[in-house]
Image (cartoon, coloured by chain):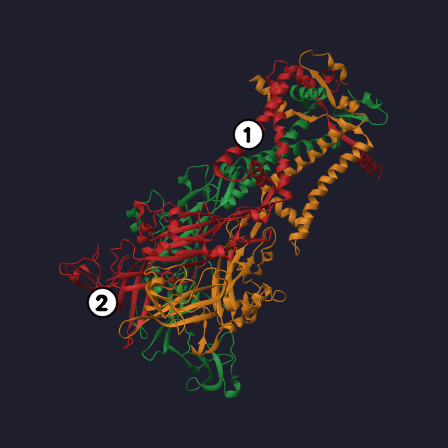
Chain colours: A orange, B green, C red
Amino acid sequence: MAGCCSWLRGFLFEYDTPRIVLIRSRKVGLMNRAVQLFILAYVIGCYCAYFAEVEMEGPSLWVLVWEKGYQEVDSVVSSVTAKAKGVTVTNSSQLGFRIWDVADYVIPAQGENSIFIMTNIIVTMNQTQGFCPELPGRTSVCKSDSDCPAGTTDTHSSGVATGRCVPYNRTLKTCEVAAWCPVEDDSLVPSPAFLKAAENFTLLVKNNIWYPKFNFTKRNILPNITTTYLKSCIYDAATDPFCPIFRLGRLVEYAGHSFQDMAVEGGIMGIQIRWDCNLDRAASFCLPRYSFRRLDTRDKNHNVSPGYNFRFAKYYTDLTGTEHRTQIKAYGIRFDIIVFGKAGKFDIIPTMISIGSGLALFGVATVLCDIIVLYCMKKRYYFREKKYKYVEDYEQGIHNEMDQ
Amino acid sequence: MAGCCSWLRGFLFEYDTPRIVLIRSRKVGLMNRAVQLFILAYVIGCYCAYFAEVEMEGPSLWVLVWEKGYQEVDSVVSSVTAKAKGVTVTNSSQLGFRIWDVADYVIPAQGENSIFIMTNIIVTMNQTQGFCPELPGRTSVCKSDSDCPAGTTDTHSSGVATGRCVPYNRTLKTCEVAAWCPVEDDSLVPSPAFLKAAENFTLLVKNNIWYPKFNFTKRNILPNITTTYLKSCIYDAATDPFCPIFRLGRLVEYAGHSFQDMAVEGGIMGIQIRWDCNLDRAASFCLPRYSFRRLDTRDKNHNVSPGYNFRFAKYYTDLTGTEHRTQIKAYGIRFDIIVFGKAGKFDIIPTMISIGSGLALFGVATVLCDIIVLYCMKKRYYFREKKYKYVEDYEQGIHNEMDQ
Amino acid sequence: MAGCCSWLRGFLFEYDTPRIVLIRSRKVGLMNRAVQLFILAYVIGCYCAYFAEVEMEGPSLWVLVWEKGYQEVDSVVSSVTAKAKGVTVTNSSQLGFRIWDVADYVIPAQGENSIFIMTNIIVTMNQTQGFCPELPGRTSVCKSDSDCPAGTTDTHSSGVATGRCVPYNRTLKTCEVAAWCPVEDDSLVPSPAFLKAAENFTLLVKNNIWYPKFNFTKRNILPNITTTYLKSCIYDAATDPFCPIFRLGRLVEYAGHSFQDMAVEGGIMGIQIRWDCNLDRAASFCLPRYSFRRLDTRDKNHNVSPGYNFRFAKYYTDLTGTEHRTQIKAYGIRFDIIVFGKAGKFDIIPTMISIGSGLALFGVATVLCDIIVLYCMKKRYYFREKKYKYVEDYEQGIHNEMDQ
């Protein structure tokens, strides 16, 4: 009890601070400061290089250091809707004069984070279940029935072989298949694209974001945007960077591609919305930044199913109850709306960790200078004598005179 | 070799510890402890403030500190399915007496993380490709053919202008368009909503989550839930917080909105499932927390395409082979199932970083007290003399008597 | 001004380093090194345990330490397309001989991160709006009209009760409902699965990833893959780990399930693509790793809507304008392509924090040894005397002789 009391008195009423050797030496003093300066410059230099490279636009150095070391971050949670507008006419020998509106060219009618706009089409009308010659290909051209093993099918066949070899046209015979007949001939993709006017269609993207950790929500339709503006605006990186309505042609251009080119075989466009928010500042500084990128790299070496397309069918029954279908191979552009970003807000934990680590780092300067002073300098023995007090465990008292 | 040996002996058999001045002073001692206490209190105080603000429910302070500083975290990877149930009848002059079941009102039939329930509808039956007067609007009302430039189309038109001005009704003339005729008239949205009974439909949400870093998986149908319970339960925040079956009406209510109101023009509801798991505790504590939020803010100022709707069509051919379609403008509620969360598990690296930084921080107390003791106190020269030993590089030995 | 100058001279030309007691004691010296070794071993040991447990394959210890402490990380942003290929025939009494191709069994025709392959089917043909007996069930079997309250409907009914009790078959009477008639009878799921040949269908998955922070993009079709290889390869964990074409049957096998079993009631398969990239190394080391997991756990206790299925309908009109539909309950496998991963790149900030904290940690060794030396050892008073210099604030000078 008494020991405890005396310990407590010691704990409360005593202050211990290290004893210091203060070496009055220009050389060593300047060296110490130089090393400290070097550490500081290195850290700031790296920041600056990073800063110059990655973020050309906005934040000052201080903000950057702040954001990295003193903020807690959260990833964005997002919900997206997209709606296309536009109508066009086509005139072809197969389909005649025809109007295309939203219900025709958006497939499926609604998606989650993406919307598909059909730009090109191969229609195979009035297919029925039956038997017909396969398209000519590496495995399907035949001379006699023996070339067509019944029941076989491979990855690229339209149906299941019946085992017969039948004339495909006047000069060519191919294996007969059980399939939806006639089989689709997709060897010739219409070019220019059938719905080339899709270039002028518009896309309204609505995006609602949420940072759960900070319970912060915002929409990409900013509070200062008026209804009148929304009714007429078109996104433009320079003049209308916050208008959420995009003209398809321009959007593809921003990504460095040609819409007409892309429309023929289809493709995938990423509409990237970046929400990087510093929630220590006002909410009005938290703004969406749009960027555009083509996601299906058109690479001559990898042209297995290039572009983007898929097949679907509309089913009909006739009077006799037989099922018909119109099969459509739809080429088009899928617009993927990709929302990402991080929000940061001051938080004591990462701040403490940063400050603590920073303090410890400056200790490195002392360690380095000590090494130089005690091992490399001419007067090293003199300095060692001043810094160290040698205590022998075994023969106590002998070496004490070495110490001041 | 001999030098190396002696260095090794020194390295292994010597112990160096800083020499300390122990100042027996109530003032300084108490001040030191006060500063240390302040640092401690500040850290804990911030935690507490944070704790009080953000997390009203569960974790003790210790857990919070633990989770932040000593755990490695991973973000959730999730897979969702949703299935609606319910059937209703409607009776209207246009469609007659009609039953609506799942295959009718869920469009598309399956999605990934969302499900759309149709609640209101504008049907335009028996459209064919043709020519008909445009809906009256700002640009479409005309007096003569000269008001209708042929071939033009704008964002809001139903088709492409033919250049003729034709009677829309007895009193009004509008430009004729090539379009799916008759054109849809969506100026009057049915109110109350056509499928207002959707309020009583139910939604079963199945969610499977995975934390790849910890290889931890769990489902939102918890192990202790029985089949009998699942067959009859309805989610209720108070009584059944883990039942994954939601009644649509109640779900909208939880988000603070009225289902009947929302059903008219549609909207988007977020079903948020939060999986915040501390994997240092038993897996049974890792539970889904449901919350509900309306994602399409209904804002009077931004009513460009308010609510949520899209158009699709059912295509038919008649005996003569002419294509008809029934166009449907479907208003409804899209339920986005948003899964998020983080799992934490003890990991040595962040722990070491936290402890290391914490230790360094307490060094601040010494630095502060030293400044006060050596620069501000009356006896500062006396203390400095005790703490420092001055060593001149140039004239060695002169100042040594200053030192004890 | 003069004071400032002298302060600056002091700041630049003086170097302060702590005075050290160097105790020449085998016991204490060895103990100190042992404690330091223990700290080091603990850290490295934990790494090793972690390493052995989680990552059986690749990275050396150094890489792991490096990645955790010295890199900035970013999460993957991804875009996915999937395309199925394959065709099969079925022969059933209800549907006759029938070919199934992509347009028939992929529903909807395109998705974002998932693709559904129909494997089993319950078709209810020629449904019309009308009145018919409900399926026999717990609430629908009746003896007289009084058992069937008009207008009621529950979660499992096919329609709305009319209030009449009508014969279902020779022996059974059930309540009549207004519904799409005849109502679907899904009590008997075809087994083996109707489209059991789906086992041999193939799936081409294209994945484009992006790390926004580092502006790094890559595709899962690697640059060294040739078109010829892509045309013929099938993914195999051992021989073709980078081929993005999967045979469905084998894919389910990899997840440890049987395709034929899964095909009957459907299910959800996760195709997980992990992109863990160390961007300090060459881009060619950043590779996709595929793994497969069944996401709908088949649990005997939770068989509420087991597997995966949904209903959709194809609508027809006949000559009289009456609407018919063919309702399809589609069972099948939904393949969810789940892309995740983190990229790391050297960054100065986390490095500084790690080094700083590491330095601070070694201070723990000194603290521990000091406690032992000054409180536990026999010669503790002697060591204390050497380490401490006592300074009294009140009666200065009295205790000075205690100090050397």
Pointer 1 local density, CA inside 10 Å: few below 14, some 14–19, many at least 20: few
Verify CB contact (< 8 Å) between mark 1 and mark 2.
Answer: no
Residue carrying label 1: C42
Callout 1 amino acid:
Tyr
* Label disc, if present, on residue C131 of the rendered structure: 2
Residue at image coords 30%, 64% = C98
Looking at the picture, tell me which residue is in the foreground, B294 or B383: B294
Image height of C331 relative to B325, above or below: above
SS at mark 1? Answer: helix
SS at mark 2? Answer: strand
Chain for mark 1? C
Asked if residue A155 lies left or right of residue A69, the reply is: left
Q: Quadrant of residue A4?
A: top right
Whether residue A72 is visible to the viewer of this picture, yes or no, is no
Residues at discs 1 and 2 both on one chain: yes
Residue A403 screen position, x and y as percent: 76, 18
Farthest residue in the bottom direction? B144
Callout 2 amino acid:
Phe
Residue C174 screen position, x and y as percent: 18, 60
Disc 1 from disc 2: Cα separation: 76 Å
Residue at image coords 32%, 63% = A163
